[in-house]
Each structure stands twice: as C-alpha cells, then as structure tokens.
Image (cartoon, helix red, strand yellow):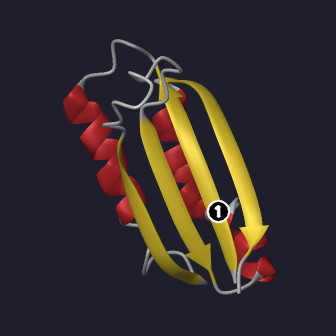
Amino acid sequence: MYEHIVVFKLKPDTELEKQQALVNQLLSFKGRIPGIVDVSAGVNVTEETKNKQGYTLGLRVTFDGLASLRAYGPHPVHQEFVKTVGDVCDNVIVVDYPIQ
C-alpha cells in the first residue's frame, strides 16, 4: 500500500465555503477512483504554528498499490479537482511513500 499526503496553500482570500467545497470534492474520490483504500481531508485548524506557513487544506489518500497511485494523477476525477483548485491555490506539497 502507498500513502499520498498533500497540503494545499490556498490564496488568503479563499472563503471558508470554497475551502469546504474543495474538501468535499476530495472526500468524494473514494469509490470514484480505483485503488483508493481510504481518504481523509480537511481544513487546517492547527494552533501549533498559528498557520504561519499558510497551508490551508490537508489530504491523505491510501492506495492499494503503486500502480493505483500512479494511475490516480491522470484519472479524470483527479484532473477535475486539479482544475477546480488551480484558481485558488498558491502552492502544493506532495509526499508519497510505501506503508505496510
């Protein structure tokens, strides 16, 4: 299995309603994209660093294998999200790693 971790730095003027709509779109991936075992996403509420880095949303997707992880990027459902978030996103950090 593989873990796919993403944090999104949205533009400062992105309304909370838009942030939540993006979270809902991310959560809809399970059952729509093959190979997803689990998904969680949410708006950053950390007080640890007062969100000084500006990263607004977090995403964690567990895939059943490397082939599924690689097929995820070009999948139409994922590409639809990429287009949606592109208008409001300043930066993204992605980390993928195998898990047991």
Compared with residue 50, is residue 1 higher up or lower down, i.e. above or below? Answer: below
Which residue extends farthest front?
Answer: 48
67 sits to left or right of 52: right
Q: Residue at x 20, y 33 (%)?
A: 17
Q: Residue at x 55, y 41 (%)?
A: 7
Compared with residue 90, is residue 2 higher up or lower down, i.e. above or below? Answer: below
Residue 20 point in image, percent of width and height: 26, 42
Which residue extends farthest left?
Answer: 17
Q: Find residue 40 and report its image quarter.
A: bottom left
Residue 91 point in image, percent of width and height: 62, 26
Quadrant where the image shows the C terminus: bottom right
Report the front residue among 27 and 7. 7
- Residue type for callout 1: His
74 sits to left or right of 55: right
Q: Residue at x 59, y 48 (%)?
A: 6
51 sits to left or right of 7: left
Report the front residue among 27 and 62. 62
Report the front residue among 35 and 54. 54
Residue 14 point in image, percent of width and height: 33, 20
Local SS, label 1: strand
Can residue 60 be seen in this snapshot?
A: yes
Q: Find residue 31 and report its image quarter.
A: bottom left
Residue 15 point in image, percent of width and height: 25, 23
Can residue 77 be seen in this snapshot?
A: no
Q: Residue at x 45, y 70 (%)?
A: 39
Mark 1 packing: few (<14 Cα in 10 Å), some, or many (20+)?
some
Q: Which residue is mark 1?
A: 4
Compared with residue 58, is residue 50 higher up or lower down, i.e. above or below? Answer: above
